[in-house]
Amino acid sequence: MEKSYIIKQISIFSENRPGRLAAIAGALREAKINIFAFSIAEADGFGVVRALVDRPEDAHRTLTDLGFRVSFTDVIGVKMRDEPGGLSDIASILGDAGINIEYAYAYSGKDAAVLILRVDQAEDAVQKILGRGGELLKASLFR
Amino acid sequence: MASWNPRAEEMPLDEMRRLQFKLVKSLIYRLYSFNDFYRRRMKEHQVHPDDIRTLEDVAKLPFMYKNDLRDGYPDRIFTAERNELVRYHVSSGTTGKPTVVGYTERDIENWSESLARGFSSCGLGRGDVIQVSYGYGLFTGGLGAHYGAERVGATVLPTSVGNTERQIELMQDLHVTAIACTPSYLLHMGEVAEKMGVSIKNDTELRIGFLGAEPWSEQMRSRIEDWLGIRAYDIYGTSELSGPMFTECAEQRGVHIWGDLALVEVVDPATGEVLAPGEQGELTITMLQKEALPMVRYRIGDLTAIEESPCACGRTHPRINRIQGRVDDMLIVRGINVFPSQVEHALLEIPQVGRHFQIVVDRKGALDSMLVRVEVSEEAFSDKITELMVIKKVVEHRLRSSLNVGVDVELVEPGTLPRFEGKSKKVVDRRSL
């Protein structure tokens, strides 16, 4: 049950220099893979591009074939109201439930805003969020 | 400057050659009779001590290489008993395994004598205070220079490397007149001193520098001498010879190699053929009086030429010109020898990164920096930045401990490092001397 809310995010190692994001995005475009959301985390000379895409398996294969270092990471997507207080509601749920966030990024789509979370115990988090009336994205959106 | 040991230093050439012949002949007989390694090597080479009838016959003897020390690790090719040794030094080998050199009391004595001659030929003596800013410890530089300077009666300030501001304070407070260090470290000291508001030229008594353990140039010499107001002399050696062993004299026209201690040849790096004086090739040295670890026709790997014309200083011993480069891919980073093969070897033992690498050496300010670019392996790639930073730190730590020199590591995308292009692409040296 909880598993159906655990989404496969793709994470791509990238050097921190001009043109690397273009190379990744270009490859996904070629493969007609749609990107729902992405973020870039940067460190000393390198970074990790994290993305939610409509076909994670295809994206993984495409990028790996091109020589990129790619991995899957389990994340969850919490729906938020796209209005003042939307994030606050969700953050309170997480805080009250004692869920620690490793990293997060968000996007605002047609239906709702979504907060994408990387947490330690994903299944546990899903259970707690649902238990507190939170709404999560289904993993079936990403095939 | 007056000779420290006039009888030795001003020995007529023909007398020196007779002495060298006697020394080499007895050395070869001793090695052949008492040491398996040398006897086997000579037999393989089909040469017997009886075949050495003139000094030129030395060319019949087989060469020795750094690998011979590595293969004989730690002391299998030593020719002294363990209880005769008074010291060890250890340097990094070409791969993971270090090379060990041992010294008898007489070896230390001759090492100090050699440097005492060199130091005094540049005017160092009683009343001087010499700051030894070479590393003390397993590296030969610190203790070698230390003993040589004490021998000529100078006062030694054994600062070793690092803590530059303190070094500059001590240089002023203790009236330091001479320094032994790498040329790049001295330039670094000059820069740090200026930031402290100290001019080495005007605010210290420094007048002599013995600079070596890394390549440098005449342009660097002029810059150092003009800027710091000192005379800068080249000092040469490797741990296989003992350590820093030979220096220029006040004429600054090449490093005198004391003929009673070492027989110097320059050979064609490809064919091994002995080259005439003035011709550039690979420096090859036979240590004539070493007891614990005599090196016979040891191929050092440095490119130079022998200068036999008489030196204006009156010393008769041959000189070698400034080192022009290496025959192999050895790098010298902050005075420490680094072989790319050591990096390769170390990386093989770190599963988090691939085996491909690129070394980028640069000079930031006056000091060398070494960057090693590696690829994160598929298994180790994590989405978490903190874990990737840990991998970077692990590789930096491992490389540092196997190379004995600090290294920055850069994680790069797979497939971006040179694969089969050979050595030239694996090392990028951006330093200009």
Image: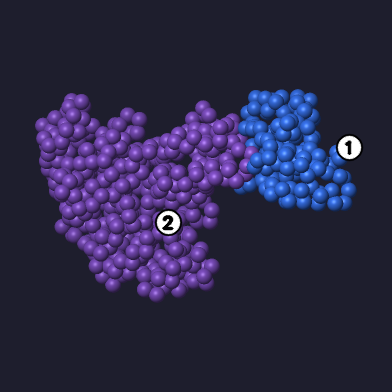
Q: Please give the name of the residue rendered at 69% of the width and 47% of the height, measured from the top-left corner.
A: A99
Amino acid type shown at disc 2? Pro
Q: Please give the name of the residue rendered at 45% of the width and 74% of the height, measured from the top-left corner.
A: B203
Q: Which residue is mark 1?
A: A110
Q: Nearer the viewer, residue B253 or A16?
A: A16
Q: Position of residue B14 (x, y in %)?
A: 16, 46
Which of labels 2 and 1 is toward the front? Answer: 1
Q: How many marks?
A: 2
Q: In the figure, the purple chain has which letter?
A: B
Label 1: state its secondary structure.
loop
Q: Please give the name of the residue rendered at 68% of the width and 37% of the height, measured from the top-left corner.
A: A123
Residue B338 placement, left or right of A88:
left
Q: Nearer the viewer, residue B76 or A1?
A: A1
Do the CB atoms of the residues marked 2 and 1 lie less than 8 Å apart?
no
Q: Position of residue B364 (x, y in %)?
A: 54, 53
Q: Position of residue A1 (x, y in %)?
A: 73, 31
Q: Nearer the viewer, residue B182 or A10?
A: A10
The picture's colour for chain A is blue
Q: Are marks 2 and 1 on the same chain?
A: no
Q: Which residue is mark 2?
A: B183
Mark 2 falls within which chain?
A: B
Label 2: state its secondary structure.
helix
- For label 1, the crowd category at 10 Å Cα-Cα, with few meaning under 14, some 14 to 19 and many 20 or more, is few
Task: Give residue B111's mark.
Answer: none
